[in-house]
Amino acid sequence: MSRTDGPGPELTSRLGYLLKHAQLRMAELNTKALAPYGIDGRELGVLFVLAGREPTSQQQAAQRLGIDRTTMVAMLDTLEGKGLVARQPDANDRRRNVVALTDAGQDTLRRATEASDAAEREFLAQLGPQAAQQLRNSLQTIVTHPEQEQS
Amino acid sequence: MSRTDGPGPELTSRLGYLLKHAQLRMAELNTKALAPYGIDGRELGVLFVLAGREPTSQQQAAQRLGIDRTTMVAMLDTLEGKGLVARQPDANDRRRNVVALTDAGQDTLRRATEASDAAEREFLAQLGPQAAQQLRNSLQTIVTHPEQEQS
DNA sequence: TATTGTTATACTCTATAACTATA
DNA sequence: TATAGTTATAGAGTATAACAATA
């Protein structure tokens, strides 16, 4: 990941470049921070989605994360293998699995979240509290309220 | 890419989630904007790196982009196939190729950049000019001045 | 017929290792 | 010996298509 710069048309100030490399750095920091808990950032995302909610099917969890249900199958296989989540056939609709955190999963979620919070602080370390909060807000606006379709 | 939200521990306010989805949206907008010119965002990045500089070897171009030299080979194969760049053996060091934009490449770079600028404006459309500029600045700070190693 | 979970498969992006030609 | 470009290959990460069980 070189950051060598030169003059010229400034590749490094294009939003596409900046977002890609920012995302790579955040993912790196998360991976490092979460390693002691045996999970990565994507898996923490799954734990998040399963936490503190009514019973959740695999498909619902996938939709909340914005990933395909077939991808969710593999993620749950892994997390179940680690003893962090449990699948249970839904009594009301036997096509479904109800997926829930195990006790170990709850514990890992709590501790891994703290580690990830620290990783986020490191990511933002150069920014100052106001700019950091602004960055969060702006990203949230963009991600959750993308522009209306304006045909 | 679902954006269905619920209450709970707020997956959607984690930086990892926000950056990933913001990056996906920007890439999507770029792809759409650049399609008329027959390139995608990554290829535009290569054109950027090759523009307005002294002669550049494949390896130098790869380093500036932060990608592997083997990845650069494939990108240049594609761009050369489209007639946008040309390889020429370096007379001074015949191991190297000097890579440069063709006239068509210069033209495509100019027009594709305008299209990409429009895509960036669409990406930022919900933000207001000040927040948009702040977002750029913050990302640039993070990407180009990541925290000092602090053992 | 439609939906859920699953499997098999394939595609994209990227990197590592090894080859070649030069230095 | 070391470097630039190349090729073959492999590994993530993700999606599409098809299948079984259930609705």
Image (spheres, coloured by chain):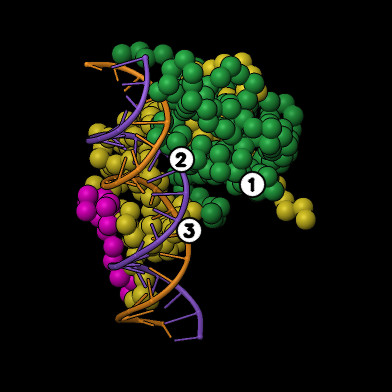
Chain colours: A green, B yellow, C orange, D purple
Task: Please indicate whether residue B122 sits to the left or right of residue A122 in the image.
Answer: left
Mark 3 Cα shell of 10 Å, populated few (<14), some (14-19), many (≥20): some
The quadrant the C terminus of chain A occupies is top left
What's drawn in magenta, residue-wise? B77-91
Label 1 sits on residue? A38
Q: Which mark is residue B63?
A: 3
The secondary structure type at the circle numbered 3 is helix
Residue at figure coordinates x 34%, y 76% from the top left: B94
- Residues B123 and A144: in front is A144
Q: Is residue A72 visible?
A: yes
Is A138 covered by the magenta stretch?
Answer: no
Q: Separation of disc 1 and disc 2 at Cα? A: 16 Å
Q: Separation of disc 3 and disc 1 at Cα? A: 32 Å
Kind of residue indicated by mark 3: Gln
Q: Position of residue A69 (x, y in %)?
A: 41, 30
Q: Which mark is residue A74?
A: 2
